[in-house]
């Protein structure tokens, strides 16, 4: 999450991760200040009592009290929100989302409450619940443009691209503020374009060419326009637009290659103390990593649709753990590493049908594999590799919102990032005791069934459970590959850089793919 992906991907999974971390590591002070109440009435007094119980780690008593309050006053948003937070902080994301859905129903799906409830469910990756809330709210006929955009995001991430388009177009017709909502980028990622006169193209061109617009708004429209032009086979036009759009973003959000190189060096010098507990044979995390846009989403979704492995998408829990362990000076504390491992398990297991193997497809987890190994000696790693020219072009063609991805706007920065990635992966392979399997994106595309079988055997998930496979198939995709992950495996993305070689000569600096070995 953390809004690392195409425009419109505004899921605040960073808030979810931080909420759970605070609950487990920092004494359970997780609820927002806006829920502080003065005991002016009996419900407010009981709510304050529930808060006190929760903060003193009497979670079961707090939950029981909150459930009673919610039954007595189902339309009280402060009660429902606190109960949902308590459930979410235990990893019970499904129950938490349903709590907010009941609140929305009790409030007759009024716009503001429905927005907050659906956004909460989406943040919990419970998109079916969010769809239900948005649908009921819009059926009232008074949905705001912001609610339409949210409904579009939820539908698109759920693979319902036609419904997403309807919501986005309705939001645009309602006059949604393009300076705040990157709707065009989300809209163009709901279909392939074949008509040069498509109204979507005209919308994007108008916004991109408006020199009075904010640079970020123009850049977002540029990335959207370039996607349309690429679909139409106008690679020269797409390259020109991308060059300007990336320049706009680079001026707003620069990336420091020297800082990255220092980070890579520091990571190789740091040492992590392993958790003291023996490996949990009932929990086997698999970290699918690589340079972003190298096929991590494709790999995870294909494994998840044919095996008993549970796909958690780009979980972002390891990233959050690692940053706090390092900033707090806890890498040498076995006790804190053990607490972090318990937190990660909670984030991964949640409250849907349990599995043994859990897939975490955040590609940037390659930065923290030593910490993953210290927490879980039973972990395994799948390392995606792709022709660097295709990977570089894909990065340069995609809008990302998070600073971690700011290198994608400049080819020299992409080169520096890839060099650091290769250096770290070589270091982990030489020093870590967990198995690491290299997988070529091109080989996966050429023989998806064969490669998925190899992967399933490697991670120990060759068995099939119908309930998990079905649930994985319905799971949302919130990465930048939201469209591609829903399509059949195709080979058109292999060698795509050749379409741009004469317009983007910088691609030549990435050399032959064999050089990545």
Image (cartoon, helix red, strand yellow):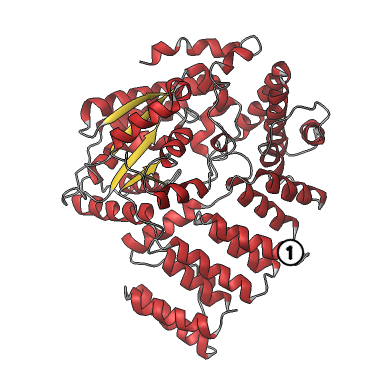
Q: Tag 1, which secondary structure?
A: helix
Indicate whether 102 appears above or below 215. Answer: below
Q: Indicate left or right for 492 with 96 as reference.
A: right
The image quarter in which residue 86 lies = bottom left
Answer yes or no: is residue 9 visible.
no
Q: Quadrant of the C terminus?
A: top left
Q: Quadrant of residue 373?
A: top left
For the point 60% across and 37% down, the residue is 483
- Where is residue 12? Give x, y as percent: 53, 52
Left or right of 22: which side holds 178?
right
Rendering coords of residue 228 (x, y %): 72, 29
Residue 160 visible in the snapshot? yes
Which residue corresponds to the image point at 78% horizontal and 51% vertical from the top-left?
170
Viewer-nearest residue: 7 or 459: 459
* Number of disc labels: 1
* Label 1 sits on residue: 139
Classify 163 as above or below 401: below
Residue 434 higher or lower than 77, as above or below:
above
How busy is the neighbourhood of tag 1: few (under 14 within 10 Å), some, or many (20 plus)? few
Left/right placement of residue 487 relative to residue 334 reads: right
Q: Position of residue 198 (x, y in %)?
A: 81, 32
Residue 122 pos. (x, y %): 55, 55
Task: Please report the residue visible at 75 percent of the width from the left and 55 percent of the height from the top.
Answer: 145
């Amino acid at each position: 999450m953390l809004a690392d992906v195409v425009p419109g991907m505004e899921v605040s999974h960073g808030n979810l991760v931080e909420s759970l971390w605070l609950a487990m590591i920092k004494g359970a002070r997780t609820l927002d200040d806006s829920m502080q109440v003065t005991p002016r009435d009996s419900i407010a007094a009981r709510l304050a009592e529930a808060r006190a119980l929760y903060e003193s780690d009497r979670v079961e008593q707090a939950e029981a009290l909150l459930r009673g309050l919610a039954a007595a006053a189902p339309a009280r948003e402060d009660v429902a929100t606190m109960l949902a937070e308590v459930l979410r902080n235990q990893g019970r994301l499904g129950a938490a989302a349903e709590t907010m859905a009941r609140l929305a129903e009790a409030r007759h799906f009024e716009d503001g409450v429905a927005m907050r409830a659906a956004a909460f469910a989406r943040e919990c990756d419970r998109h079916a619940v969010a769809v239900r809330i948005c649908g009921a709210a819009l059926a009232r006929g008074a949905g705001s443009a912001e609610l339409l955009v949210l409904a579009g995001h939820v539908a698109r991430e759920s693979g319902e691209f036609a419904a997403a388009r309807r919501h986005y177009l309705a939001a645009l017709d309602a006059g949604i503020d393009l300076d705040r909502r990157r709707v065009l980028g989300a809209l163009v990622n709901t279909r392939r374009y074949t008509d040069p006169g498509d109204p979507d193209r005209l919308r994007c061109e108008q916004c991109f060419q408006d020199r009075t617009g904010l640079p970020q708004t123009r850049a977002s429209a540029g990335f959207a326009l370039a996607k349309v032009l690429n679909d139409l086979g106008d690679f020269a036009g797409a390259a020109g637009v991308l060059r300007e759009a990336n320049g706009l973003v680079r001026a707003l959000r620069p990336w420091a290659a020297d800082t990255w190189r220092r980070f890579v060096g520091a990571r190789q010098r740091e040492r992590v103390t392993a958790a003291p507990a023996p490996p949990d044979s009932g929990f086997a995390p698999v970290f699918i990593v690589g340079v972003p846009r190298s096929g991590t989403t494709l790999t995870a979704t294909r494994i998840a649709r044919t095996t008993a492995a549970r796909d958690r998408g780009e979980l972002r829990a390891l990233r959050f753990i690692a940053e706090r362990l390092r900033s707090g000076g806890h890498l040498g504390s076995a006790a804190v590493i053990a607490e972090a491992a318990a937190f990660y398990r909670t984030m991964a297991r949640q409250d849907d049908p349990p599995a043994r193997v859990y897939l975490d497809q955040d590609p940037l987890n390659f930065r923290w594999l030593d910490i993953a190994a210290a927490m879980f000696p039973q972990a395994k790693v799948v390392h995606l590799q792709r022709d660097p020219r295709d990977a570089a072009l894909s990065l340069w063609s995609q809008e990302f919102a998070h600073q971690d991805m700011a290198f994608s706007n400049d080819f020299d920065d992409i080169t520096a990032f890839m060099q650091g990635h290769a250096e770290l992966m070589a270091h982990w392979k030489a020093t870590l005791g967990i198995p690491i399997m290299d997988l070529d994106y091109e080989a996966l595309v050429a023989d998806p069934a064969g490669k998925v079988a190899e992967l399933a055997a490697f991670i120990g998930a060759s068995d099939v459970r119908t309930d998990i496979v079905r649930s994985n198939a319905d799971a949302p995709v919130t990465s930048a590959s939201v469209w591609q992950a829903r399509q059949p495996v195709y080979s058109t993305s292999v060698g795509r850089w050749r379409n741009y070689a004469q317009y983007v000569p910088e691609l030549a600096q990435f050399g032959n793919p064999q050089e990545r070995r």
